Image (cartoon, rainbow, N blue to C red):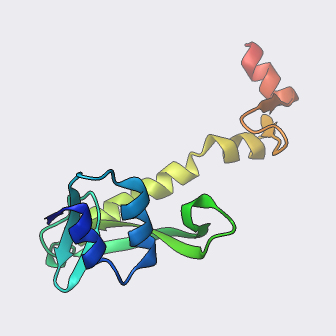
Amino acid sequence: LELTKEEAVKLFAYNKFKLEIITTKVPDGDVITAYRCGDLIELCRGPHIPHTGCVKAFEIVKHSNVYWMGNEDNASLQRVYGIAFPDKTLLKAWQEEQAEVERRDHRKIGKKQELFFMDPLSPGSVFMLPFGTRIYNK
């Protein structure tokens, strides 16, 4: 759906979060896109799948607690990350790939083999340990 700012304000009048996005982030005269799936109408850039019947397999990847607009004085919201696939074999392949990625995580391997460490006081900095220094200097 393509909506004017005024139409979007009327459509999403029940939701203070969406109203804030519409009134503060969308310039006057701009077109706003919303997507419909059955009774649900969502303010979103999209595109989305035509209908939820296309999703045959999905997984919730992670979730986190966030503050609205990144301000701790605002409401606390739950953010959910997920991934969807048109069939279960693609989901299974993705899960196996993610397991392999985690198994090969250089941060875990380096720590386990005592090659280097990272200190939270210096994000992004790698500190070489004696074994790591030997490998690096070769």
For the N terminus, which image quadrant?
Answer: bottom left
Image check: 130 left or right of 132? right
Residue 38 figure quarter: bottom left
Task: Residue at 75%, 39% (x, y): give it.
Answer: 123
Task: Residue at 82%, 31% (x, y): give it.
Answer: 127
Frontmost residue, 68 versus 100: 68
Residue 9: where, in percent of width, then height? 30, 72
Residue 3: where, in percent of width, then height? 18, 64
Residue 130: where, in percent of width, then height? 87, 27
Frontmost residue, 130 versus 58: 58
Image check: 20 left or right of 102? left
Is residue 53 depicted above or below 47 in this figure?
A: below
Residue 17: where, in percent of width, then height? 45, 72
For the C terminus, which image quadrant?
Answer: top right
> Quick check: can you spot residue 53?
yes
Residue 43 figure quarter: bottom left
Frontmost residue, 20 versus 58: 20
Task: Residue at 18%, 75% (x, y): give it.
Answer: 36
> Quick check: can you spot residue 87?
no
Is residue 1 depicted above or below 26 in this figure?
A: below
Task: Residue at 72%, 39% (x, y): give it.
Answer: 110
Residue at the limit of the structure toward the top, as seen here: 138
Frontmost residue, 75 versus 109: 75
